Image (tube, rainbow, N blue to C red):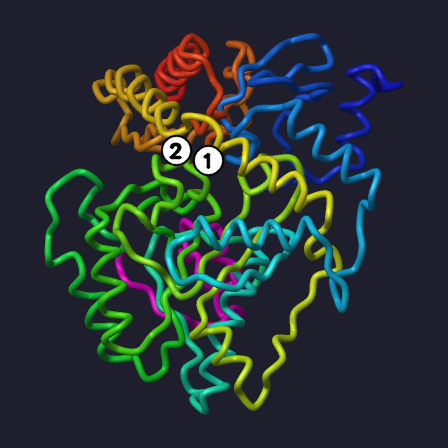
Amino acid sequence: MSKYSTEELLALDKQYVWHPYSSTVNAADVFPVVSASGVRLTLSDGTELIDGMSSWWSAIHGYNHPILNAAIYRQTEAMSHVMFGGLTHPPAVELCQLLTSLAPPGLTKVFLSDSGSVSVEVAIKMAIQYWFSLGRPEKNRLLTIRNGYHGDTFGAMSVCDPVTGMHEIFRGILPTHLFAPSPTSRFGEPWDESDIAIFHQLVDKHHQEIAAVILEPVVQGTGGMNFYAPEYLKRVKSLCEEYDVLLICDEIATGFGRSGKLFACEYADISPDILCLGKALTGGYMTLAATLCNDRVSKGIGGGKVSTFMHGPTFMANPLACSVALASIKLLLSTPWQRKIADIETILRQQLNPCRALAGVHDVRVLGAIGVIELTQPVDMHTIPREFVNRGVWVRPFGKLVYIMPPYIISPADLITLSNALCEIVQIANK
Protein backbone atom coordinates (compact mmCIF):
# COMPACT_ATOMS: atom_id res chain seq x y z
CA MET A 1 0.00 0.00 0.00
CA SER A 2 1.16 3.53 -0.74
CA LYS A 3 2.03 5.85 2.13
CA TYR A 4 0.16 8.57 0.25
CA SER A 5 -3.56 9.18 0.01
CA THR A 6 -5.10 9.17 -3.46
CA GLU A 7 -5.18 12.96 -3.48
CA GLU A 8 -1.52 13.22 -2.40
CA LEU A 9 -0.44 10.65 -4.96
CA LEU A 10 -2.21 12.46 -7.79
CA ALA A 11 -0.76 15.80 -6.69
CA LEU A 12 2.76 14.36 -6.69
CA ASP A 13 2.13 12.68 -10.03
CA LYS A 14 1.06 16.01 -11.51
CA GLN A 15 4.14 17.71 -10.08
CA TYR A 16 6.82 15.22 -11.12
CA VAL A 17 5.59 12.70 -13.71
CA TRP A 18 5.37 13.03 -17.49
CA HIS A 19 3.09 10.33 -18.85
CA PRO A 20 3.25 8.93 -22.40
CA TYR A 21 1.40 10.80 -25.15
CA SER A 22 0.52 13.64 -22.78
CA SER A 23 1.10 17.33 -22.15
CA THR A 24 2.51 18.65 -18.88
CA VAL A 25 0.53 21.86 -19.36
CA ASN A 26 -2.94 20.54 -20.09
CA ALA A 27 -2.74 16.98 -18.82
CA ALA A 28 -5.70 14.63 -18.84
CA ASP A 29 -6.70 12.69 -15.72
CA VAL A 30 -4.70 9.69 -14.63
CA PHE A 31 -6.05 6.94 -12.39
CA PRO A 32 -3.86 5.40 -9.64
CA VAL A 33 -3.72 1.60 -9.75
CA VAL A 34 -2.69 -0.21 -6.57
CA SER A 35 -3.12 -3.83 -7.68
CA ALA A 36 -4.14 -5.98 -10.62
CA SER A 37 -5.37 -9.56 -10.80
CA GLY A 38 -6.99 -11.54 -13.56
CA VAL A 39 -8.63 -9.00 -15.86
CA ARG A 40 -9.22 -6.40 -13.14
CA LEU A 41 -7.31 -3.30 -12.14
CA THR A 42 -7.95 -1.98 -8.64
CA LEU A 43 -7.67 1.77 -8.10
CA SER A 44 -6.54 3.41 -4.87
CA ASP A 45 -10.14 4.25 -3.94
CA GLY A 46 -11.16 0.58 -4.28
CA THR A 47 -12.77 0.91 -7.72
CA GLU A 48 -12.32 -2.18 -9.87
CA LEU A 49 -11.96 -1.84 -13.64
CA ILE A 50 -12.29 -4.58 -16.25
CA ASP A 51 -9.19 -4.13 -18.38
CA GLY A 52 -9.91 -3.85 -22.09
CA MET A 53 -6.37 -2.90 -23.11
CA SER A 54 -4.17 -5.74 -21.78
CA SER A 55 -1.75 -2.99 -20.77
CA TRP A 56 -1.18 -1.90 -24.36
CA TRP A 57 -1.86 -5.39 -25.71
CA SER A 58 0.76 -7.24 -23.69
CA ALA A 59 -0.96 -8.87 -20.67
CA ILE A 60 -2.55 -11.69 -22.63
CA HIS A 61 -2.89 -13.95 -19.56
CA GLY A 62 -4.19 -11.15 -17.35
CA TYR A 63 -2.44 -10.04 -14.18
CA ASN A 64 -0.85 -11.74 -11.20
CA HIS A 65 -0.79 -15.13 -12.88
CA PRO A 66 0.69 -17.77 -10.52
CA ILE A 67 2.71 -19.52 -13.24
CA LEU A 68 4.32 -16.31 -14.45
CA ASN A 69 4.86 -15.10 -10.89
CA ALA A 70 6.66 -18.33 -10.07
CA ALA A 71 8.92 -18.01 -13.12
CA ILE A 72 10.05 -14.58 -11.95
CA TYR A 73 10.65 -15.74 -8.37
CA ARG A 74 12.66 -18.80 -9.41
CA GLN A 75 14.89 -16.80 -11.72
CA THR A 76 15.47 -14.10 -9.09
CA GLU A 77 17.01 -16.72 -6.83
CA ALA A 78 19.56 -17.61 -9.53
CA MET A 79 20.34 -14.16 -11.01
CA SER A 80 18.27 -11.16 -11.94
CA HIS A 81 20.66 -9.84 -14.58
CA VAL A 82 23.98 -10.44 -16.25
CA MET A 83 25.49 -8.70 -19.27
CA PHE A 84 24.98 -10.57 -22.55
CA GLY A 85 28.25 -9.51 -24.16
CA GLY A 86 30.56 -12.51 -23.95
CA LEU A 87 28.20 -14.33 -21.58
CA THR A 88 25.04 -16.36 -22.05
CA HIS A 89 22.51 -18.07 -19.81
CA PRO A 90 19.87 -20.83 -20.06
CA PRO A 91 16.70 -18.65 -20.16
CA ALA A 92 17.96 -16.71 -23.19
CA VAL A 93 19.15 -19.80 -25.06
CA GLU A 94 15.92 -21.69 -24.38
CA LEU A 95 13.80 -18.71 -25.36
CA CYS A 96 15.62 -18.22 -28.66
CA GLN A 97 15.30 -21.92 -29.44
CA LEU A 98 11.57 -21.83 -28.69
CA LEU A 99 10.98 -18.69 -30.77
CA THR A 100 12.68 -20.13 -33.84
CA SER A 101 10.63 -23.33 -33.51
CA LEU A 102 7.36 -21.36 -33.46
CA ALA A 103 8.09 -18.52 -35.88
CA PRO A 104 7.45 -18.70 -39.63
CA PRO A 105 9.86 -21.12 -41.35
CA GLY A 106 13.46 -20.16 -41.98
CA LEU A 107 13.92 -17.67 -39.14
CA THR A 108 16.97 -19.15 -37.44
CA LYS A 109 18.66 -16.39 -35.44
CA VAL A 110 17.25 -14.24 -32.60
CA PHE A 111 18.55 -10.86 -31.43
CA LEU A 112 17.00 -9.93 -28.09
CA SER A 113 16.42 -6.33 -27.04
CA ASP A 114 14.39 -4.44 -24.48
CA SER A 115 11.48 -2.82 -26.35
CA GLY A 116 9.44 -3.09 -29.52
CA SER A 117 10.81 0.15 -30.93
CA VAL A 118 14.35 -1.12 -30.45
CA SER A 119 13.52 -4.40 -32.16
CA VAL A 120 12.46 -2.34 -35.20
CA GLU A 121 15.69 -0.30 -35.00
CA VAL A 122 17.59 -3.60 -34.97
CA ALA A 123 15.65 -4.88 -37.98
CA ILE A 124 16.37 -1.71 -39.97
CA LYS A 125 20.07 -1.85 -39.10
CA MET A 126 20.20 -5.52 -40.07
CA ALA A 127 18.67 -4.81 -43.47
CA ILE A 128 20.98 -1.90 -44.26
CA GLN A 129 24.11 -3.67 -43.02
CA TYR A 130 23.18 -6.76 -45.04
CA TRP A 131 23.34 -4.85 -48.31
CA PHE A 132 26.47 -2.98 -47.22
CA SER A 133 28.10 -6.33 -46.57
CA LEU A 134 27.20 -7.47 -50.07
CA GLY A 135 28.86 -4.41 -51.57
CA ARG A 136 25.62 -2.56 -52.30
CA PRO A 137 25.58 0.40 -49.89
CA GLU A 138 23.18 2.28 -52.17
CA LYS A 139 20.39 -0.04 -50.97
CA ASN A 140 19.69 1.92 -47.78
CA ARG A 141 16.09 3.09 -48.03
CA LEU A 142 12.91 1.44 -46.80
CA LEU A 143 9.52 1.03 -48.38
CA THR A 144 6.41 0.80 -46.24
CA ILE A 145 2.68 1.53 -46.34
CA ARG A 146 0.56 4.37 -45.03
CA ASN A 147 -1.29 4.03 -41.71
CA GLY A 148 1.57 2.02 -40.27
CA TYR A 149 3.14 2.38 -36.85
CA HIS A 150 6.46 0.88 -35.77
CA GLY A 151 7.54 2.75 -32.65
CA ASP A 152 8.70 6.08 -31.27
CA THR A 153 12.49 5.98 -31.67
CA PHE A 154 14.02 7.78 -34.65
CA GLY A 155 14.54 4.86 -37.03
CA ALA A 156 11.12 3.46 -36.18
CA MET A 157 9.48 6.89 -36.52
CA SER A 158 10.86 7.23 -40.04
CA VAL A 159 8.70 4.32 -41.24
CA CYS A 160 5.55 5.31 -39.35
CA ASP A 161 2.83 7.11 -41.28
CA PRO A 162 3.91 10.79 -41.25
CA VAL A 163 0.42 11.83 -40.09
CA THR A 164 -1.34 8.99 -38.28
CA GLY A 165 1.99 7.80 -36.88
CA MET A 166 2.05 10.89 -34.62
CA HIS A 167 5.49 12.07 -35.71
CA GLU A 168 4.78 14.68 -38.37
CA ILE A 169 6.71 17.41 -36.50
CA PHE A 170 9.94 15.49 -37.15
CA ARG A 171 9.50 15.57 -40.92
CA GLY A 172 12.69 16.91 -42.46
CA ILE A 173 14.81 15.51 -39.64
CA LEU A 174 14.01 11.82 -40.06
CA PRO A 175 15.42 9.75 -42.93
CA THR A 176 13.17 9.96 -46.00
CA HIS A 177 11.68 6.65 -47.00
CA LEU A 178 9.05 5.50 -49.49
CA PHE A 179 5.35 5.11 -48.71
CA ALA A 180 2.72 3.20 -50.66
CA PRO A 181 -1.01 3.67 -49.95
CA SER A 182 -2.49 1.55 -47.20
CA PRO A 183 -4.28 -1.51 -48.62
CA THR A 184 -7.98 -0.96 -49.25
CA SER A 185 -8.84 -4.64 -49.73
CA ARG A 186 -10.16 -5.59 -46.33
CA PHE A 187 -9.71 -8.81 -44.44
CA GLY A 188 -12.40 -11.34 -45.38
CA GLU A 189 -13.55 -9.40 -48.44
CA PRO A 190 -12.76 -9.88 -52.16
CA TRP A 191 -9.24 -9.01 -53.26
CA ASP A 192 -8.81 -6.06 -55.61
CA GLU A 193 -5.74 -6.54 -57.80
CA SER A 194 -5.35 -2.78 -58.26
CA ASP A 195 -4.55 -2.55 -54.54
CA ILE A 196 -0.95 -3.60 -55.15
CA ALA A 197 -0.37 -1.42 -58.22
CA ILE A 198 1.30 1.62 -56.64
CA PHE A 199 3.39 -0.57 -54.35
CA HIS A 200 4.53 -2.48 -57.43
CA GLN A 201 5.42 0.76 -59.21
CA LEU A 202 7.48 1.96 -56.25
CA VAL A 203 9.42 -1.30 -56.01
CA ASP A 204 10.00 -1.34 -59.75
CA LYS A 205 11.28 2.24 -59.78
CA HIS A 206 13.34 2.23 -56.58
CA HIS A 207 14.45 -1.38 -55.98
CA GLN A 208 18.09 -0.49 -56.59
CA GLU A 209 17.99 1.74 -53.48
CA ILE A 210 15.50 -0.21 -51.31
CA ALA A 211 17.04 -2.33 -48.57
CA ALA A 212 13.77 -3.68 -47.23
CA VAL A 213 10.02 -3.42 -47.07
CA ILE A 214 8.65 -3.09 -43.54
CA LEU A 215 4.99 -3.51 -42.63
CA GLU A 216 2.62 -4.91 -40.04
CA PRO A 217 1.15 -8.12 -41.45
CA VAL A 218 -2.63 -8.09 -41.93
CA VAL A 219 -3.31 -5.89 -38.87
CA GLN A 220 -2.11 -2.30 -38.78
CA GLY A 221 -1.98 -1.18 -35.16
CA THR A 222 -1.71 2.30 -33.75
CA GLY A 223 -1.49 3.92 -37.18
CA GLY A 224 -5.09 3.07 -38.03
CA MET A 225 -6.26 -0.30 -36.69
CA ASN A 226 -6.90 -1.52 -40.24
CA PHE A 227 -7.34 -5.19 -41.11
CA TYR A 228 -6.29 -5.84 -44.71
CA ALA A 229 -6.46 -8.79 -47.08
CA PRO A 230 -3.72 -11.43 -46.62
CA GLU A 231 -3.42 -11.50 -50.41
CA TYR A 232 -1.76 -8.08 -50.21
CA LEU A 233 0.96 -9.51 -47.99
CA LYS A 234 1.41 -12.44 -50.37
CA ARG A 235 1.92 -10.03 -53.28
CA VAL A 236 4.37 -7.94 -51.25
CA LYS A 237 6.41 -11.04 -50.46
CA SER A 238 6.41 -12.07 -54.12
CA LEU A 239 7.56 -8.61 -55.25
CA CYS A 240 10.31 -8.58 -52.64
CA GLU A 241 11.61 -11.85 -54.02
CA GLU A 242 11.30 -10.67 -57.64
CA TYR A 243 13.15 -7.39 -57.04
CA ASP A 244 15.68 -8.67 -54.48
CA VAL A 245 14.43 -6.69 -51.50
CA LEU A 246 14.28 -7.92 -47.91
CA LEU A 247 10.95 -8.18 -46.09
CA ILE A 248 10.58 -7.10 -42.46
CA CYS A 249 7.35 -8.04 -40.69
CA ASP A 250 6.51 -6.14 -37.52
CA GLU A 251 4.46 -8.51 -35.36
CA ILE A 252 4.96 -6.61 -32.13
CA ALA A 253 1.20 -6.08 -31.79
CA THR A 254 -0.02 -9.26 -33.49
CA GLY A 255 2.42 -11.89 -32.27
CA PHE A 256 1.30 -14.67 -29.91
CA GLY A 257 -2.29 -15.10 -31.01
CA ARG A 258 -3.90 -11.66 -30.97
CA SER A 259 -5.16 -11.87 -34.58
CA GLY A 260 -6.37 -15.46 -34.31
CA LYS A 261 -3.12 -16.95 -35.62
CA LEU A 262 0.03 -17.35 -33.56
CA PHE A 263 1.60 -14.90 -36.00
CA ALA A 264 -0.41 -12.83 -38.48
CA CYS A 265 2.03 -13.83 -41.26
CA GLU A 266 0.32 -17.21 -41.18
CA TYR A 267 -2.81 -15.76 -42.79
CA ALA A 268 -0.74 -15.17 -45.94
CA ASP A 269 1.40 -18.30 -45.54
CA ILE A 270 4.61 -16.30 -45.94
CA SER A 271 7.84 -16.02 -44.02
CA PRO A 272 9.73 -12.71 -43.84
CA ASP A 273 13.48 -12.26 -43.85
CA ILE A 274 13.25 -10.39 -40.54
CA LEU A 275 10.54 -10.56 -37.86
CA CYS A 276 9.98 -8.18 -34.92
CA LEU A 277 8.30 -9.38 -31.72
CA GLY A 278 7.49 -7.68 -28.42
CA LYS A 279 4.50 -6.69 -26.24
CA ALA A 280 2.90 -10.09 -25.43
CA LEU A 281 6.30 -11.82 -25.51
CA THR A 282 6.51 -11.81 -21.69
CA GLY A 283 2.78 -11.83 -21.05
CA GLY A 284 3.03 -8.18 -20.02
CA TYR A 285 5.36 -8.85 -17.08
CA MET A 286 8.59 -7.26 -18.24
CA THR A 287 9.91 -5.33 -21.19
CA LEU A 288 11.51 -7.60 -23.78
CA ALA A 289 11.57 -7.77 -27.56
CA ALA A 290 13.13 -9.93 -30.23
CA THR A 291 14.27 -9.53 -33.83
CA LEU A 292 14.46 -12.80 -35.73
CA CYS A 293 16.18 -13.23 -39.09
CA ASN A 294 16.94 -15.97 -41.60
CA ASP A 295 20.30 -17.38 -42.62
CA ARG A 296 20.41 -15.13 -45.67
CA VAL A 297 20.55 -12.06 -43.44
CA SER A 298 22.77 -13.41 -40.65
CA LYS A 299 25.30 -15.00 -43.00
CA GLY A 300 25.23 -12.02 -45.34
CA ILE A 301 26.18 -9.71 -42.49
CA GLY A 302 28.63 -12.17 -40.93
CA GLY A 303 30.48 -12.72 -44.19
CA GLY A 304 30.74 -9.05 -45.11
CA LYS A 305 33.47 -6.43 -44.81
CA VAL A 306 31.90 -5.29 -41.53
CA SER A 307 30.92 -8.66 -40.10
CA THR A 308 30.06 -7.55 -36.57
CA PHE A 309 26.54 -6.32 -35.87
CA MET A 310 27.11 -3.27 -33.70
CA HIS A 311 24.14 -3.22 -31.39
CA GLY A 312 24.01 -4.23 -27.73
CA PRO A 313 21.38 -2.97 -25.29
CA THR A 314 22.61 -3.06 -21.69
CA PHE A 315 19.64 -5.11 -20.55
CA MET A 316 19.56 -7.33 -23.64
CA ALA A 317 18.39 -10.85 -22.78
CA ASN A 318 17.64 -9.97 -19.16
CA PRO A 319 17.27 -13.36 -17.42
CA LEU A 320 14.10 -12.38 -15.54
CA ALA A 321 12.45 -11.24 -18.77
CA CYS A 322 13.60 -14.32 -20.70
CA SER A 323 12.34 -16.63 -17.95
CA VAL A 324 8.90 -15.09 -17.81
CA ALA A 325 8.74 -15.01 -21.62
CA LEU A 326 9.41 -18.75 -21.70
CA ALA A 327 6.72 -19.32 -19.09
CA SER A 328 4.22 -17.10 -20.91
CA ILE A 329 4.69 -18.75 -24.30
CA LYS A 330 4.47 -22.25 -22.80
CA LEU A 331 1.36 -21.23 -20.87
CA LEU A 332 -0.24 -19.94 -24.06
CA LEU A 333 0.56 -23.10 -25.99
CA SER A 334 -0.78 -25.29 -23.18
CA THR A 335 -4.24 -23.69 -23.42
CA PRO A 336 -6.90 -23.86 -26.14
CA TRP A 337 -5.96 -20.31 -27.09
CA GLN A 338 -7.34 -20.54 -30.64
CA ARG A 339 -10.79 -21.37 -29.27
CA LYS A 340 -10.55 -18.54 -26.74
CA ILE A 341 -9.66 -16.03 -29.44
CA ALA A 342 -12.47 -17.32 -31.66
CA ASP A 343 -14.95 -16.96 -28.79
CA ILE A 344 -13.78 -13.41 -28.10
CA GLU A 345 -14.14 -12.56 -31.79
CA THR A 346 -17.68 -13.94 -31.89
CA ILE A 347 -18.81 -11.92 -28.88
CA LEU A 348 -17.14 -8.74 -30.13
CA ARG A 349 -18.89 -9.06 -33.49
CA GLN A 350 -22.26 -9.60 -31.83
CA GLN A 351 -21.85 -6.76 -29.35
CA LEU A 352 -20.15 -4.12 -31.49
CA ASN A 353 -21.97 -4.51 -34.81
CA PRO A 354 -25.03 -2.54 -33.61
CA CYS A 355 -22.74 0.47 -33.20
CA ARG A 356 -22.58 0.75 -36.99
CA ALA A 357 -25.96 2.45 -36.88
CA LEU A 358 -24.87 5.12 -34.40
CA ALA A 359 -24.31 8.71 -35.44
CA GLY A 360 -20.65 9.60 -35.82
CA VAL A 361 -19.51 6.01 -36.40
CA HIS A 362 -17.49 5.51 -39.57
CA ASP A 363 -16.79 1.81 -39.24
CA VAL A 364 -16.80 -1.20 -36.91
CA ARG A 365 -14.30 -4.00 -37.42
CA VAL A 366 -13.28 -7.11 -35.50
CA LEU A 367 -10.50 -9.63 -35.99
CA GLY A 368 -9.40 -12.15 -33.40
CA ALA A 369 -9.24 -10.49 -29.99
CA ILE A 370 -9.35 -6.98 -31.47
CA GLY A 371 -12.51 -4.89 -31.60
CA VAL A 372 -12.48 -1.42 -33.17
CA ILE A 373 -15.04 1.34 -33.52
CA GLU A 374 -13.79 4.08 -35.83
CA LEU A 375 -15.48 7.44 -35.40
CA THR A 376 -15.74 10.34 -37.80
CA GLN A 377 -14.17 12.73 -35.27
CA PRO A 378 -11.44 12.31 -32.61
CA VAL A 379 -12.56 11.64 -29.05
CA ASP A 380 -11.92 14.10 -26.22
CA MET A 381 -9.21 12.45 -24.13
CA HIS A 382 -9.90 14.84 -21.25
CA THR A 383 -13.40 13.45 -20.72
CA ILE A 384 -13.77 10.03 -22.32
CA PRO A 385 -11.38 7.98 -20.10
CA ARG A 386 -13.28 9.19 -17.03
CA GLU A 387 -16.55 8.04 -18.62
CA PHE A 388 -15.10 4.56 -19.05
CA VAL A 389 -13.87 4.47 -15.45
CA ASN A 390 -17.32 5.53 -14.26
CA ARG A 391 -18.65 2.39 -15.99
CA GLY A 392 -16.10 0.11 -14.33
CA VAL A 393 -13.92 -0.54 -17.39
CA TRP A 394 -10.53 0.59 -18.61
CA VAL A 395 -10.36 1.57 -22.27
CA ARG A 396 -7.98 4.13 -23.72
CA PRO A 397 -8.96 5.39 -27.20
CA PHE A 398 -6.70 7.34 -29.49
CA GLY A 399 -7.68 9.74 -32.24
CA LYS A 400 -10.87 8.51 -33.89
CA LEU A 401 -10.43 4.95 -32.68
CA VAL A 402 -12.23 3.44 -29.70
CA TYR A 403 -11.00 -0.12 -29.41
CA ILE A 404 -10.35 -3.03 -27.08
CA MET A 405 -7.74 -5.78 -26.98
CA PRO A 406 -8.65 -7.66 -23.80
CA PRO A 407 -6.65 -10.39 -22.06
CA TYR A 408 -7.36 -13.80 -23.55
CA ILE A 409 -8.67 -15.06 -20.20
CA ILE A 410 -11.58 -12.61 -20.12
CA SER A 411 -15.00 -14.14 -19.39
CA PRO A 412 -17.95 -13.68 -21.76
CA ALA A 413 -19.76 -11.62 -19.11
CA ASP A 414 -16.84 -9.23 -18.65
CA LEU A 415 -16.37 -8.95 -22.40
CA ILE A 416 -20.04 -8.04 -22.84
CA THR A 417 -19.70 -5.41 -20.11
CA LEU A 418 -16.69 -3.95 -21.95
CA SER A 419 -18.49 -3.98 -25.28
CA ASN A 420 -21.59 -2.34 -23.86
CA ALA A 421 -19.44 0.39 -22.35
CA LEU A 422 -17.85 1.03 -25.76
CA CYS A 423 -21.25 1.45 -27.38
CA GLU A 424 -22.45 3.79 -24.62
CA ILE A 425 -19.32 5.93 -24.76
CA VAL A 426 -19.45 6.19 -28.54
CA GLN A 427 -22.89 7.73 -28.22
CA ILE A 428 -21.61 10.21 -25.60
CA ALA A 429 -18.54 11.06 -27.69
CA ASN A 430 -20.70 12.14 -30.60
CA LYS A 431 -23.10 14.40 -28.70
Q: Which residue is mark 1?
A: 398
Q: From the viewer's perspective, is residue 128 above or below residue 258?
A: below
202 sits to left or right of 310: left
Q: From the viewer's perspective, is residue 2 above or below residue 140?
A: above
Image quadrant where residue 315 sits = bottom right
Q: Residue at x 59, y 86 (%)?
A: 306
Q: Identify the mark at residue 408; answer none if there is no mark.
A: none
Q: Secondary structure at mark 1?
A: loop
| Chief secondary structure of the magenta portion | loop
Q: Which residue is mark 2?
A: 401
Q: Amino acid at mark 2?
A: Leu
> Are circles 2 and 1 on residues that touch, CB within 8 Å?
yes
Q: Tell which of 279 and 157 is nearer to you.
A: 279
Q: Which residues are magenta?
A: 155-181
Q: Residue at x 53, y 21 (%)?
A: 51
Q: Residue 374, image x and y in percent?
A: 32, 32
Q: Amino acid at mark 1?
A: Phe
